[in-house]
Each structure stands twice: as structure tokens, then as C-alpha cells.
Image (spheres, coloured by chain):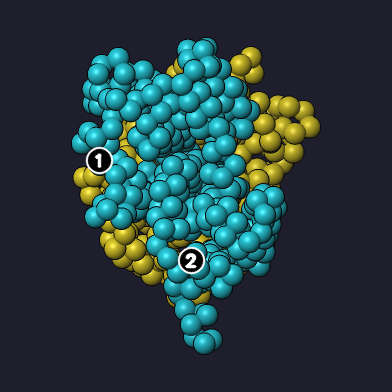
Amino acid sequence: MNNLINSYFVKTHKLEISITIIALVLFLIYFLGAPHVFTRFPIYRAFMQSMPFFGIIAISATFVVTLGEIDLSFPSIVGITSLIFGIIMTSTDGNFFIAFILATSLGMFAGLVNGLLVTKIGIPSIVATIGTLFFWRGLVNVISQGSGIAIVDVADGTWHHMIFVEKLFGKIPMQFIWFIVLTGLMQWVYRYHKFGNHIHFVGDNKASAQMMGINVDNVKIIAFVQLGFFSALAGIFTMYEMLYFWPTQGEGLMLTTLAAVFVGGTSVFGGKGTIFGTFIGVLIIGSLESGIVALGLSGFYVKFINGLMITVAVTVYALIQRRKN
Amino acid sequence: MAEELLKLENIYKNFGNVKVLKDVNIKINKGEVVALIGDNGAGKSTLIKVITGVHTPNSGKVFFKQEEVQIKSVAQSRKMGIEAVYQERALCDQQELYRNIFAGREITNSFGFLDIKKQRKEAEKILRDYIGFTSKAITVDSQVMGLSGGEKQGVAFGRSLYFNSDLIVLDEPTMGLSIQETEKVLNFVKGLKNENKSAIFIDHNIIHVYGAADRFIILDRGEVVGEFNKEDISREELVQKMIQLHESGKIKVED
């Protein structure tokens, strides 16, 4: 047992192990408390259906948080890119390629704006992205005049609808497959690509990174741009699932998404983080609402227990970190 | 006549209205260790940052290996063979040693993915051969956080040797180190000469500077106010000059 605790793997993966244990305990509670729900498939299908929408953004946001930065504007980037996607889809009679390229380009542009405000103008990211949060949502309201867009006629039954959200073997929602693939890809980039490496160094110590020849501004800008892209992508997934755009689309994503990143163990101080942890964080945060209701507690407990989970998780990480120092 | 490695001519650097460097001319030969001394705010750090590409000068010329160059980035100065060793900022604390050693010039495949195996192997070599770490507690996978000041400095030195740089820039290399560790660092600086490498270093401690350097360049408020070869000046005289400068703002030049 002692050997196990002191092994190299355990030492270097304390965060990942803690978060996995927390998730296992949580699912054990679900399982024991509501066996009639959690021994059957439908609840898992529901999870697989709903988690990817904010999960994709959470994975991508882990890069920005590892930089020691934050982006609060992604809910509105989801909004504006979904709106554009809806407009193009309906006006081109379902031209997926044009709609996809324009929506994701707009997402990247919105990310670029965030990145430039933070690096070239020098506004702290929390302030800059509050500004763009309101800006893009405001633009959604102005353009849409408060009304939604149905894409049912141009999207339902198409091949793109199939690869985005239909069920594989009639059981597994495609968005979950995409979510797993993207998580794997992003984990690879995060740990083993030059860009991921630079993210860690810039988040750890900006001045050192600069002196080691890392272009700090570029790394930050690219991080915001990729978050813009994945916000757009998450918006497109949601559009295919709902076949409808509504002007508040994306609102409500902010807290669950960031909670998943922090519960997952990525340090708000920057320099250290884990994509795997964020993935588990998504499973935890994404399952709480249904889990709590299935346990027989009223919906009023959802926020309370959400808050408890986040507080306990970040306290555990802070203690692990303090012992190290 | 010694071979010239680096020459700065009429370098000016302003930050807004503040003139930090005013008409600075210096020269460093191959195999020579030059110390930059001067009070806080004299412009020492700015000057070495111009050399390492962190800052670009407002005007003036830079020659490296007798060719005029414009150093626009750290990556470029590194490629030319200038390597900086910064005391506190040399490494990132929460990252593994093997990642630190290759930060900013990772060994990658053509898609930009790291060759972790090779980085670890080369890092191992640096720890063993260049720095002589034998402690089992420190491996290439250790985070920098757990290292002592001297060990961090050692890693930074090892890195500069590994990348085979011609000019090593040392910013306060002995600051915050224990006596033994300081000794190691100074020996390292002396050892550079045997390999015909040059170094430029900043240190507040004249005793350290005197022991390790061949030539001293005194900066004051952005200007070079004195330059002495070691054989022309004793340690006591050098200390006297500095005190004089501090009190009167001038150095008496005897002829």
C-alpha cells in the first residue's frame, strides 16, 4: 500500500486521482440512492446527450485557465455564432459548409478580439471578457430582434445532422463520441504539443517564459481564438440537437463550464492543469442535476449541492498544493 | 589581438521619456568575461536585455562575430549563440526539468508534437555530464520548485553549455545563493574561459566580480563611465572607484 502511494504515477497524478475518487463516490451515491434510475441505460444516454454542449467548451477553456487567464464571454460567443449559423443555414437552404465555416470563423474572430484586448491593449482578461460578453449578446439581440430561428426544415434528416447528434447504433449520441475524440485530441495537444507546453510556461511565469524565447502574446491570443472556435462548435452542436436558435442560447453555460474546469483541478493561478480532470469535472457537474432529482431531493437542492461540490473540490486542491510548497 | 565577439555602438534605449541607455559603446572578445557594474537604475539590466533580444534599442548598432545584426527576439539571439542565465527567472517552477531545459526550443516532430523521450534523454545527459547532479532526489521529471537556488542556477548553466552558445549572459548569478553555491557558480564562470566562451555578467558584489571577470565596465545613469582591465586595477581600487562614483557621481580618470 505504501509503495502504491509513493509510486511515481501517484505522485505526479494526485489531482487526477483525487477528482476520479470524488466522481466515483458521487456515482456510488447515485447508484445506492436511486438504483432504479442508475442501473438502467436511459439516464446515461441523457448524460451523453447533454454533457458535450458545455463539455467541449470546458475542455477548451482549460487552456485559457492554465494561462492564468479567464474568458467570461464564451456564452455570448455561442449566442452570436449560433445566430449566424441559423441565418446562413436558412438563407442558403441548408448549405452546411458555408454556415459552418462562417460561424466558426466568427467564433475565432471573437476569440481574437478577446486575445488582442488582453495582450495588446493590456486589459485584464476578466474585465475585457465581461465587456465582450455583453457586446456579443447585445449584438444577438439587435440582429435577432428577440426572435428565434427554426432550422428544422434545412437540417433535420441531413447527413450533417446525422454526424453531429444522431445516435450511433441507435444508442450512443454522436455528440458524445465527438466530445470523447476532442477531449483525447486536446489532451494530446495540452501535454505533448509545443503549444500546450508554451501554455504551461506562460501560465506558470510570464516573465520567465518570455526570457526563454516564448512569444507570450501569441500563445495567449491563440488560446482565446481556439476557445472562440470551440464555443462556436458547441453552439452548432446545440443547434442540431434543438433544431432551433433562440436568442438566449448559451446563457447559463458560464457557471457550469467554469465549475467543471475548476472542479477538475486546473489551478486558477495558472501553470498547472489537467484535461482529464476537466473531463471528470464535466461528468460531475453535468450529472448533478439529474442525480439529485433521481435521489428524491427536490430541485431546490441542485445549486446548493453544486456549490458544495465546487467548494470541497477546490479546497482539496488548495491543500494538496500547500503541502507541496 | 583578441578576436571580437560582440560590439555595441552608440546604443540608445528610451522607455517613454526616460533615457535608460545613452550612447553606450562596449566590446566583448572571445574567451573574455566582462562584468557590468553600477548602482541600481544604472541601466545594466536594460543593456543585457538589449543583448538578449528582450528589448530592441531605439538607435545604435550591434555587431556579433563582426557582422552587423538586429536582435529582435530572444529566439533569434539564442540562435545566434547568445544564452541568458537569469537568476530567479531562469526556470518555471511548476514545470518538469526536462520541459524547462527545452522551453522555447522544444525537440518536436514536423507537426510540433514534442519528442518527450528525446527531451528526457538529453535532459538526463545535461544533469549528469554538464552539471554533475548525482542526487537521486532530482530527476528530469522533478519540478523546479523543489530545487535550491544553486541547483536552479546549475540547470540554467547546463542548458547554456548544452546549446553551445558563444556568449553567456549572467544576470546576478550569485544573488541569494549560499557561500558554497556561490563558489560553484564563480568556478563555472571561470571555467567558461577554458572553452573559449565569453560571458557578460552583472553582480552587485564586487568581490565576486573581481574574482571572476577579466574586465570591468562601470555604468552610471545609462552611460559607460569607466572601463578597467583586471591587470590595471586592484580590488581595493575598484571598490574605491565605486564609492567615489556613488558619492560624487563621477569617476576620476587618472592618466
Q: Are marks 1 and 2 in contact (CB under 8 Å)?
A: no
Relative depth, front residue between A34 and B9: A34
Chain letter for mark 1, please.
A
Which chain is represented by cyan in the image?
A: A
> What residue sits 66% from the left and 67% below the top?
A323
Instruction: Identify the residue shown where x is 52% and y is 70%.
Output: A35
Give, as a three-letter code, the residue at label 2: Phe
Q: Which residue is mark 2?
A: A38
Question: Does B76 sit left or right of A221 as displayed?
Answer: left
The answer to whether residue B98 shows anywhere in this view is yes
Q: Element type at marker 1?
A: helix
Which numbered circle lies on residue B97? none
Q: Are marks 1 and 2 on the same chain?
A: yes
Question: What is the count of numbered marks?
Answer: 2
Return the x and y of residue B209 as percentages of the image width and height: 59, 49
Residue at 20% from the left image edge and 36% from the top image edge = A159
Please state the chain letter of the residue tagged with numbered disc 2 in the rendered image: A
In the image, residue A217 sits, relative to residue B155, either above or below, namely above
x%, y% of residue B2? Answer: 35, 40
A92 over A271 or under it: above or below? above
Query: Could you say where residue A240 lies in the image, as x and y percent from the top left?
Result: 35, 35
Quadrant of res B115: bottom left
**Residue A69 lies in what quarter of the image?**
top right
In the image, residue A240 sits, relative to residue A195, either above or below, namely above
Instruction: Work out which quarter of the rendered image holds the C terminus of chain B and state it.
Output: top right
- Residue that mark 1 sits on: A162
Of the residues shown, which amino acid type is indicated by label 1? Met
Chain drawn in yellow: B
Q: Residue at x 61, y 58 (%)?
A: A292
